[in-house]
Image (spheres, coloured by chain):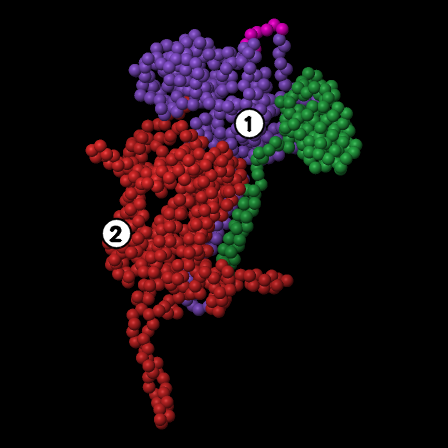
Amino acid sequence: MADKNESFETKDFGWMVAMSILFLVLVAVCFWLEFSTEWGGYQLEFPQLLGHYGKVEDARDFQAGIKQIWIPKIGVTDRCITCHLGYEWSSVLPATIAEPLKPHPMNDMIAKHEFAKFGCTPCHGGDGAATTIAGAHQGGTGWEDPMLSNALAAQNGLTMNEMIQMRCNFCHRHDVATPGMDEINLAKVLFKKKKCLLCHVVEARGGTTGPELTYEGDRNPELLIFTHVQGEHTMFNWNVQHLTKASAVSPSTAMPDFNFKPEESRALTLMLMSWRRLSYPPEYIPDPEVAAAAMQPSPTSTPTPTPSATPVAR
Amino acid sequence: MGDKIKALWRKTSWAWSPESERESSEAIVKNFWLHWFPAKVARASMDWNYSFWLGTASASLLLILTITGVMLMFFYVPSTERAYGSIKDLQYAVSFGRLLRNQHRWAAEGMVAVVYIHMARVFFTGAYRGPRAVNWVVGVVLFLATLFLSFTGYLLPWDQLAFWAITVGTSIAKQAPFVGPTIQFILLGGHEIGQQTLLRFYVLHVFFLPVLAWVLFAYHMWRVRKDGGLAAVERVRNERVMAPKATPKTKSYSLFGLTPGTSVQVMSSTGLEESDQVFSSPNMSRRIALVFLVVFNITLLAAILFNAPLEGLANPSVTPNPAKAPWYFVWLQELVASTTVRFGGYTVSGALLGGILLPGFLLAVLTLWPWLDRSPLRAGGRWLAPERKRQNLTFAIATLAIIVLIMVGVYLRGPYWRIYWPGQPRPETPRLY
Amino acid sequence: MDGERRKILRFIGKGSVLAAFLAQIGAAGRAFFPNVLYEPPSRFKLKRPDDYPDGYTLDEAHRLYVIRQKEAFHVISAICTHLGCNVQWRDTEFDCPCHGSRFRPDGTVISGPAPRPLDWFATTVSPDGFLEVDSGKDVARDFRLVIGGKGQA
């Protein structure tokens, strides 16, 4: 080759080598990222934990990888169990185990809401499709439905068990009263007592003085006016303060100042925010009368068996 | 055995690493991939500082987008019920899915910028003059295809960002006089953005526009060959002044035997000399490979460092505040938002003025520019020729204005499209709880 | 730069590109192996043992029969071993509607084109008290899952 061609080869040689090595380095980084998942460590820990509690065969059969509960009927694709591996092991693992491996608490009520039928997010919120902690718990930008946590509940002056009732009411909306949903039950009682339907339409019944509340839980928080609202600009705060003293939040309102106690306002707000456009198949909607009957203490009823001990046969 | 393998390897790859000038020439004629290259290419065309190889970078990005795009097609579902979930799956449940999607997104945004900068380079070097005017027009169409590819792709994730950006974009299209509503009707497949819109945008994005881009790209390359290479070649030709060459001593036959003397007067050629050129294979093919590697590395690095945005599921009832077009269209949105004119009882909508008429005018001027340009032909093929001061200044000012509008739209506009200066607190978006 | 160093660097450069390219092909190949399946998993939960009556109960969604004899459970696949249709339990035998294969109550073939007996699936009780079937694991025809006490004990 003539000298002139050499010069191009010389000019480009250094860059070609450098870019080639950089290419390999970047691809190696991609592989490293792919294998350093947030859930990988927990999946190494879990079989050891199972073995420690005597479940040697299950520990041996454990397969690593993304795990999901898929329920197309209700649009659930929950990968929470990729980290929360102990969820179905309350009969073996103690509740003192740290998150995320700790077993899901178990009692009669929870036993009725089987994991295979409900998944996780209908009750807990969050983005079930995600496999990172931030992605699943808070969700990405603009994700409206963060996971209900102790911290989030505390921010709103509630406990987790109180706040989660908002989501229970997605299906139990038409129960007159439901065992285990004290706050919502209180809200339903107040709703009747204070005759909200005089001014508001809810499910095609009521007056038109005030806005329709049938799907109040779907309302866009940005449409609310927060000028006179104390604290954070959340729909929860707005409703609590509006229910307590409507004229303080909306000076020109026709709604009377009910002066509810704080727990009453919070209960009513939980109920209002539970009213969303959701379509669950009929087998998910509880029979209102069954729930009401369960509220009555009956001397002849036998408690439903609690799955507690390990199964016998193998 | 080792020799046989080496011989086989040599047989298949000789064209890419020719070992003689003859092999270099033959490579162009005998190899399918190389047949579109000239046997030799001017050194001036190879110069980094002339073209910055932006055209090659644009083509590299198109190739990266095509490959990553085809891979994404195995996972993405163009249904309003499933699109969002399929993107989430890519992000969280498909091996390397996050990186694949990211690389596609950043290559796409990069391509809009690189194609524009390539166009600016062609303009500032006056490389659209003369016969190259046709290729300029082809380039403008390629630029529009790039923009439209980006626009159709933007809708596919079916999140709030996508849905409302396309709402803004198609509403601007509706304002075109006479044909506007019909164009919007065909684009959307109806009056609202829905399943039919998603499907149309999907087919446009994965089939029609890529085919158009590749076919036009091939024609774009063909025109470069027909036009005699890059415009830098014209500069080299212009610099070759016709001057008498030193006359070679020669012998001539006279009546009495050999007589020493000189032969005919020869002028130096105004064509390219051998010293001006190098063999395309391997020099140009090597640089193309290098540019591709650099571009690939940059997009991969961006994919590793930054996630492609994904907001909440598209909700036709809730408009995000503010709702912005993608950055390469946000300058249009700025124009639309600020050019509504009211006089007397009449209102001229900003969507018509700033969204259709002004950009339409700019596009027409851009396309017809080679025929509007009055600078001397000799000024082409080099950077910022003084004879082209007026033309270059016009383009620079227009580009600067567009960049300023983009910056304002992206960084300074907050809720209700009000201006918020850096440091000025913005109202927090209310949440549920 | 002298020839020897050049040669090594050139080798490193080409080697890097080749390795990275092959790794990319590998990554692309890996991406095509789904990590999550949108289909019923091969291992799944049914109802609680107490929800099943004695005898043969068809589970259409999972294409199997749950057979209970007092406290002993076993699960037989309803998928005909001939060409995959669902067999029907007819009180004394399984009949396949597609090509007429007949099977005994334990799944062995009486007559017809079916080449093998019906599969028996490994069945256990899940930690939270549901019957759990592993359709990827076969067991012998003497398998019984015996459950002691009410529910489980």
Residue C62 visible to an observer of this rendering: yes
Q: Colour of chain C?
A: green
Residue identified by numbered label 1: A73
* Labels in figure, total: 2
Residue B240 is a magenta residue? no
At 44% from the left and 22% from the top, the residue drawn is: A152
Q: Residue furthest right?
A: C110
Give whichever of A209, A71 is nearer the camera: A209
Q: Is residue C150 left or right of residue C22?
A: right
Query: Quadrant of residue C34 in the image?
Result: top right
Above or below for B83 versus B65: above
Give whichever of B424, B140 is nearer the camera: B140
The kind of secondary structure the magenta stretch mainly shows is loop
Residue A298 is a magenta residue? yes
Residue identified by numbered label 2: B393
Q: Which chain is red?
A: B
At 59% from the left and 16% from the top, the residue drawn is: A108
Which quarter of the image is occupied by the N terminus of chain B? Answer: bottom right
At 55% from the left and 42% from the top, the residue drawn is: C31
Above or below for B92 versus B228: above
Which amino acid, mark 2? Leu
Which amino acid, mark 1? Lys
Q: Which residues are magenta?
A: A294-300
